[in-house]
Amino acid sequence: MSTRPVVLHLCGSAASDYYEGVSVVYATGCLQEIAEHGTYTNVACIVHLDGSWSFPSNMSEEARSSAEHMSIDQAVLKIKELNPSAVVPHMFCLPGMTAFRGFCDVMNIPLVGNPAAVMALSTNKWQTMALVASHGVKVPAAEMVSKGEVPKMQPPFMVKPCNEDNSQGVALVQELSALQSALDDAFQFDHEVLVERYVPLGRELRVAVLEQDDKSLQLLPCIEYFLTEEDPIRTAAHKLVTDQSGKPVGLASGGRKCPADIDEPLREKLRDLAIRSHKALGCRDYSLYDVRVDPQGEPYFIEACLYCSFSPQSVVVAMAAHAGQDQRSVFEMLVNRAISRKKAAGTRTVGMKG
């Protein structure tokens, strides 16, 4: 019998086929990459839209289709039998980023990355912006609107569902004539909508910090996405390729560069923004941010993206590679850290707390 630690990879979605597709794309990339490392026994666990769970032998379509579906009660017993040393979350829907991470805590399984409470905060764009702004981070002016309300702000501005990711329901409104259509689209995804002052296109960056074992925060090389005045914002189409039903089946290719060409003055501003945001939100292990740099070179916090699936295409992994840290070193550093957190707490048994 193998003595390698068992690592559970929590995938799927309890909310939509779209987010199940996102999860499968990223989790498959991770599991394929780590299959040959031999450090852990990696087990896939998929939460399905109908509430059932499955544990396929791998993430191929054949294995996923043939895996037995079971109830949550059966899944809890299965997980207890597996006795995982850590869990890597690959769920991107709101319940996946919050409730299912909380489930891992209740099961007493250490989680790689940010805990449920931090994710719950970060999924609310309005609250996130207010919190980081209170810690000295520059953010665009914004207001929240509910159905039937009209924003006081004048265009140009962004319209975004408050609790939605992957640019779903996001629009740039440059004329009031386009407002109602943008609001109608955004309200399909959430009952609250963020109206955010449009930051003129200078540069579009993703900025991340990786927590080291000595607790220091390392600013990773940034990614720059190349946009134009005709196409000035990143939408869902810039991120994922979907099939005819709209379900993600792969990652979109597009103009981007890592490491981005960042001079020292801007680098220090980005470092300050990322570290202040990481600490303000209470992040753990790593954090990632969308940042818009205006034509004058001033960076603005746009939103927090506090997840990583550790596939070679995952943003944090791609950034770390340009800092001399490959996927295996980053993945194993954070998995081992999660295992150590449980050992430090003096708990060993997987099962309901109480």
Image (cartoon, helix red, strand yellow):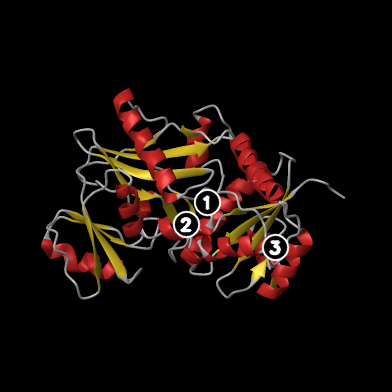
Say few, some or many: other residues with alpha carbon within 10 Å of mark 2 (under 14 / 14 to 19 / 20 or more). many
| Nearer to us in this view, 299 or 134 | 134
**Marks 3 and 2, Cα distance to the nearest angstrom?**
25 Å
Q: Disc 2 designates what residue?
A: 119
Residue to which mark 1 is pinned:
114
16 w.r.t. 121: above or below: below
Q: Is residue 231 something one can see in this rendering?
A: yes
Q: Nearer the viewer, residue 100 or 171?
A: 100
Which mark, residue 55? 3
Residue 217 lies, in percent from the top left, at 48, 35
Give the secondary structure at mark 2. Answer: helix
Quadrant of the image containing the C terminus: bottom right
Q: Residue at x 54, y 53 (%)?
A: 25
- Dot 3 falls on a residue whose secondary structure is loop
Using the rendered image of the protein, determine whether residue 305 is visible from the camera's viewpoint: no
Q: What residue appears at the point 75 percent right and 66 percent down from the top-left corner?
A: 78
User: In the rendered view, does 281 fall on the left or right side of 233?
Assistant: right
Whether residues under marks 2 and 1 lie with C-beta atoms below 8 angstroms apart, the answer is yes
Identify the amino acid type marked 3.
Answer: Phe
Q: Position of residue 192 (x, y in %)?
A: 30, 68
Give how far across and how far down residue 42 sits, in percent.
71, 50
Horizontal and vertical percent position of residue 258: 42, 32
